[in-house]
Image: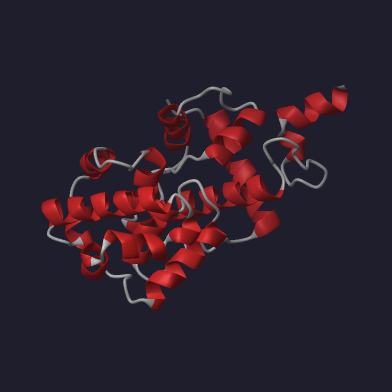
């Protein structure tokens, strides 16, 4: 349900973050296929590690749909080793590419021309593709308005007192999508800014609240100040 007060809070938070950090130019990638691969490789690792894996794939000329799918799994695993969990991610990449081949004849254009809700469900049925990865593919590759939720999102907005500490993925996603205009560029920028403040300030164990651009809005900051 749309709530004008919540919408105003979410916009206010976005504006404060944008004033502090500016545009994040996210997601980095030269082609839709590169972004697709990056969405899988970034699972449980830092983007710095993903960049190393992507560089390896480019150097060996494997960063195309047919070449990656035809590459020996052992070779692919070696190339993406910097991203961690490389054997698992090799299987996940191959599962995703085989899904696209089987259902959309190797065409990302054809894949993203299908109904977005139906495509999301299909992606979730691919072994190794969870909600965050599926929504990253839909938003950043397909330019479909699905708000991406990650650990930073849950941590920051629970500390702000806007979502429950134990809220699940879909609950958090609906919270944003029900209260913000469905706009691809806006969703992109908002999520990138959330990641930025999560890395810079809202750390898991010891948040750095001092010069956080939204510290005045934060329930945790207020609580800590009173103790």
Pinpoint residue 188: horizontal percent, then vertical percent: 47, 53
Which residue is rendered at x = 52% and y = 54% of the image? 189
Pinpoint residue 123: horizontal percent, then vertical percent: 26, 43
Which residue is rendered at x = 25% and y = 66% of the image? 71
Which residue is rendered at x = 86% and y = 23% of the image? 226
> Foreground: 106 or 135?
106
Residue 187 in sight here: yes
> Can you say which quadrant of the picture contains the N terminus?
top left
> Can you say which quadrant of the picture contains the C terminus?
top right
Mark count: 0
Which residue is rendered at x = 34% and y = 55% of the image? 143
Residue 113 in sight here: no
Tell me, what colour scheme is on the image?
secondary structure
Pinpoint residue 129: horizontal percent, then vertical percent: 33, 43
- 116 relative to 180 in the view: left or right: left
- 175 relative to 20 in the view: left or right: left
Residue 123 versus residue 62 in the image, above or below: above
> Foreground: 178 or 206?
206
Pinpoint residue 203: horizontal percent, then vertical percent: 69, 41
> Foreground: 21 or 74?
74
- 173 relative to 47 in the view: left or right: left
Q: Quadrant of residue 97?
A: bottom left
Q: Quadrant of residue 220?
A: top right
């Amino acid at each position: 349900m749309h709530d004008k007060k919540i919408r105003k809070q979410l916009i206010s938070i976005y504006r404060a973050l944008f004033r502090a950090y500016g545009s994040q130019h996210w997601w980095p990638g030269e082609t839709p296929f590169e972004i697709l691969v990056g969405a899988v490789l970034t699972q449980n690792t830092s983007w710095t590690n993903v960049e190393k894996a992507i560089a390896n794939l480019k150097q060996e000329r494997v960063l195309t749909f047919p070449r990656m799918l035809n590459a020996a799994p052992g070779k692919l695993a070696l190339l993406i080793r910097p991203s961690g969990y490389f054997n698992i991610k090799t299987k996940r990449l191959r599962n995703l590419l085989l899904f696209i081949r089987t259902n959309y004849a190797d065409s990302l254009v054809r894949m993203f021309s299908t109904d977005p809700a139906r495509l999301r469900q299909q992606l979730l049925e691919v072994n190794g593709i969870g909600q965050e990865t599926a929504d990253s593919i839909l938003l950043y590759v397909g330019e479909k308005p699905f708000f991406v939720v990650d650990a930073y999102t849950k941590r920051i907005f629970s500390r702000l007192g806007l979502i429950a500490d134990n809220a699940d993925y879909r609950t958090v996603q609906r919270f944003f999508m029900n209260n913000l205009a469905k706009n691809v560029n806006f969703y992109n920028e908002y999520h990138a800014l959330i990641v930025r403040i999560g890395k810079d300030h809202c750390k898991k164990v010891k948040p750095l609240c001092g010069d956080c651009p939204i510290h005045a809005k934060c329930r945790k900051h207020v609580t800590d100040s009173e103790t």
